[in-house]
Image: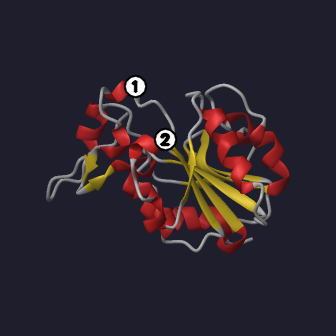
Amino acid sequence: MNSTETGVILLAGGSSARFGAENKLLAPLNGHPLIWHSASALAAIPFAIRVVVAPPALQIDWTILGFEQVDAPESPMLSASIARGMARLSASQCRACIIALSDMPFVPISHFRALAEYSDAPVVATGSGQRAMVPARFARDQWDRLSSLSGDTGARALLRDAPVIDALSEWLCDIDTPADLARVTRPAGDPGTCPA
C-alpha cells in the first residue's frame, strides 16, 4: 500500500476547553499556528485525499494545504469527529486512511509516510513504550468499525492488538494547556521539552 491509495483525516474539532478562551489550534508555536505543523507535514505527502474535521470558527483556508474541510459536529466527542471524517472518506476510492490529531505538532513527515507504506495489516498504530496510539492507519475493511465508535477514547479499542511503528517520545507531544505550549516553544538554541 502507498500514500496515493490512502486518505487522511486530521481531527481539529475538539473544544480546547483546557486551553482557556483561545482556541489552542490557533496559538503560535515557533512562528506558525499550532495546527499548521501537523497539517503541513501531511500536506507534504501525496495522499489521495486529505480531510480536516474542524469548526468553521477557525477561519482557515484549508485548500492552501490541500485539505477539504468537513465541519466538526456539535458533539465534542472524538468518536463523533471520526465518524464525520469517515462519512466524507467513504465516498472515495481509498484503500486505507490515516487518522491524525491536530494538537500533535511534532510528528514528522517520515513517520506519516511509514504509516502509509506499511504492509497490508488491517490496522497499524504509532508506538511509544507500551502504548499503541494515533496517528494510525486503518485499512478500508475497518472503516465501518471506525464509523460506529462511541465516546471520547477515539480508536483506542481498534489499536489494542495492532502492530506499531515506533516513534520518539518527543514526536508524540500533544498540546492541551498553555503550560504544555510553553514547554515546547523553542527559543533559538533551546530544543524545548515534551510535556509529561
Q: Which mark is residue 17?
A: 1
Q: Position of residue 38 (x, y in %)?
A: 44, 56
Q: Quadrant of the N terminus?
A: bottom right
Number of numbered discs visible in the structure rendering? 2
Number of residues whose C-alpha sits closer than 10 Å to that of mark 2, classed few (under 14), some (14–19) or many (20 or more): some
How far apart are the two marked residues, 1 and 2, measured between alpha carbons? 14 Å
Inspect this view and state whether residue 31 appears: yes
- Which of 104/84 is in front? 84
Secondary structure state at the residue bearing disc 1: helix
Q: Which mark is residue 31?
A: none
Residue occupied by mark 2: 55
Inspect this view and state whether residue 109 appears: no
> Can you say whether 126 is above or below 179 in the image?
below
- Quadrant in the picture for residue 18: top left
Residue at the limit of the structure toward the left, as seen here: 188
Q: Quadrant of the C terminus?
A: top left
Residue, x 15% and y 53% (percent of image)?
187
Q: Position of residue 105 (x, y in %)?
A: 40, 51
